[in-house]
Image: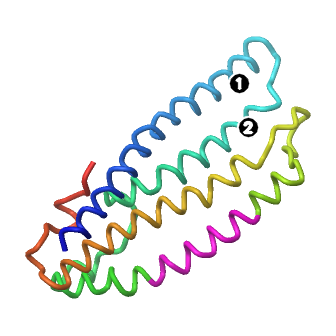
Amino acid sequence: MQILLKISSVIDWINSRVGIVVAYLVYLIMGIIAYEVVMRTAFNHPTTWVHDVSGWTQVFYIFLGGAWALQRGYFVRVDVAYQKFPVRVQAAIDLFIGSALMAAFAYVIIDKGFDLGLRSYGMGETSANGTWKGRVWPAKLVVPIGMILITLAWVSRAIRSAIRLIDPNAIDSEESVEAAG
C-alpha cells in the first residue's frame, strides 16, 4: 500500500509542478490580447496572429493545467447523491465507474490527438486565419500530452480510491487532502 501511495505522490508532484508553471500562461494570454488592443486602437494596425496565438496558448493552459485542476478537485462534478454514500461506496464509484469512463475518454483523446497532431506536423499545417502562417501542430499535440497528464492525475486518484475501498480510514478523503503539491 505504501508503494502505491508513493506512486500517487510522485504523480501529484509532477502535475503540481506542471500546473504551477502553466498557471502563468494566463498572463501571457492577457499580454498578447493587450498588445492586440493597443495595436488596433492606438496605431490602427491590427495583428494577424494574436487570435491564433492566444487561442493556442489557451489550449496549452487548459490541457496542461487540467491535471493540476483534477488533482486539486477543481473539476465540476455533481455531488447530490454521491456525498450521501458511505466512503467505501464513493471509493468504488470513483475506482470502477469513474476509471472506466476516464479510460474511454483518455483513449480517444490520446489516440486521435496524436494522430491529428502528427498529421498536422507532417503536412506542415498552418493557420487558416490571416496571412502569418503560424504552425498549428504544437497546439494539436499538446492536447494528447495534456490528456496523458490528466490520466496520470486520475491514476493517482484511483490509487487513493482503491486504498479507501480497502480501508476507509487509511487516508483522508479527496476533499480534505486536495492532493500533494
Cβ–Cβ under 8 Å for marks 2 and 1: yes
- Give percent across and percent down for residue 136: 78, 47
The disc placed on residue 36 is 1
Dominant secondary structure, magenta: helix
Q: Is residue 15 magenta?
A: no
Q: Which amino acid is tagged 2?
A: His
Give above or below for 126 relative to 78: above
Give above or below for 167 relative to 51: below
Q: Name the residue: 26% across, 76% down.
A: 161
The disc placed on residue 74 is none
Q: Name the residue: 39% across, 53% down.
A: 68
Q: Is residue 103 magenta?
A: yes
Coloration mode: rainbow
Q: Give the extent of the magenta segment.
A: 100-115
Per the model, the C-alpha gap separating discs 2 and 1 is: 9 Å
Q: Name the residue: 28% across, 78% down.
A: 80
The disc placed on residue 51 is 2
- Going by the picture, which residue comes out furthest to the left? 169
Q: Name the residue: 54% across, 54% down.
A: 63
- Give percent across and percent down for residue 172: 13, 67
The answer to whether 121 appears left or right of 72 in the picture is: right
- Give percent across and percent down for residue 139: 69, 48
Q: Quadrant of the N terminus?
A: bottom left
Closer to the N terminus: mark 2 or mark 1?
Answer: 1
